[in-house]
Image (cartoon, rainbow, N blue to C red):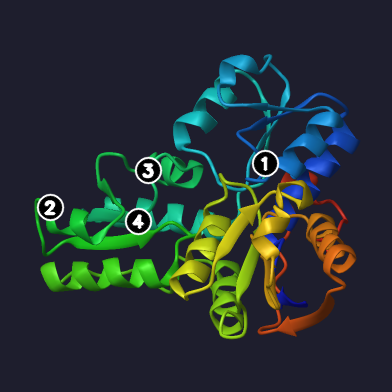
Amino acid sequence: MRILLAAPRGFCAGVNMAIQSLELALERFGTPVYVYHEIVHNRWVVERFRARGAVFVDNLADVPEGAHLLYSAHGVAPEVRREAAQRGLKSVDATCPLVTKVHREAIRYAADGYTIVLIGHRGHDEVVATMGEAPEAIVLIGSEEEVDRLDVPDPDRLVYLTQTTLSVDDAARIIGRLHERFPKIVGPRGQDICYATQNRQEAVIELCREADFALVVGSRNSSNSQRLAELCRASGVDARLVDGPDDIDMAWLADRRNVLITAGASAPEDIVQDCVRLLEDRFDATVELRTIREEEVRFLLPDSLRGDIKPSED
């Protein structure tokens, strides 16, 4: 067996920043530190932080007044910030800057009188947070069929934005259909889909040409991990999304010769390596690191934590 180990894979700059923010908050403030929603969408990351004293909540009523509260990488709606301030919570904002960019676009276009078509997955933390910036102006869609049913007050004042972790190809098809129906629709300045999502998808498309099976390391509630598995299948390669080595069924790998291994943007590298070692041990597999694109993006820590500390080099 040959393992095609994709690069880039795993943690992106936004995830690195959010994780380092929570690590520093625990060191500086002690336990408990409360986190609004999961810090990132990965079971291993959440469980490890929970064991260290982080408390993950979906309702601010579960946070004692005056406690330290960290916002996850996916962002929060303005009403969450207002409620936190009213309760005297000491907030640390670990929202990914690329998500913040989409929030600012929503605020600006809503103020200019546009109807905003947000392309994304209903119920995803990032989508909920973005819609909270201008709920009266935003319409959520997730498919070309929903574009066909879309009714807007003024087709001449229409803009689309996207969730940052979408499939690039799926988003392009939806955007194309929007342009067909609404020729005057405008888009954001630069793509909203983040660089890391695009790079990991690009690597999968390239390496699926050589693979006969794919393992995507990531949790099921991770949008970008789900998209990687879907992209493998769309490329004609059988793929499985796994949290770690315990999820791997050896029957999947019978007679496989070229196995692609990649990881979503919130999957820890040590879990990826555990999966690699399992295949090395069971199938005498050799590993080829296949770098499709280099990544050098780093994000600064939140102001409340920054001090003299530099962004993570991980």
Residue underneath mark 4: 108
Q: CA distance from mark 4 to mark 2?
A: 26 Å
What residue did someone put label 3 on? 122
Categorize mark 2 by other alpha carbons within 10 Å: few (<14), some (14-19), many (20+): few
| Location of mark 1 (residue) | 39
Q: What kind of residue is marked 2?
A: Arg
Q: Name the residue located 26 percent from the left edge and 55 percent from the top edge.
A: 117
User: Which quadrant holds residue 260?
Assistant: bottom right
Depth check: give the residue in front, 275 or 304.
275
Amino acid type, callout 4: Arg
Label 4 vs label 3: CA separation?
22 Å
Can residue 296 be spotted in the picture? Answer: no
Dot 1 or dot 4, earlier in sequence? 1
- Figure disc tally: 4
**Distance Cα–Cα, label 2 vs label 1:** 35 Å
The correct choice, above or below, for 194 with respect to 146 in the image is: below
Q: Position of residue 184 (x, y in %)?
A: 15, 72
Q: Are marks 1 and 4 in contact (CB under 8 Å)?
A: no
Tell me the amino acid under the disc marked 3.
Arg
Q: Earlier in the sequence, mark 2 or mark 3?
A: 3
> Residue at image x 69%, y 66%?
254
Distance (Cα) linking label 1 and label 3: 19 Å
Residue 166's x, y, as percent?
Answer: 45, 61
Q: Is residue 25 visible?
A: yes
Q: Secondary structure at mark 3?
A: loop
Residue 149, numbered circle: 2
Residues tagged 2 and 1 counted as in contact (Cβ below 8 A): no
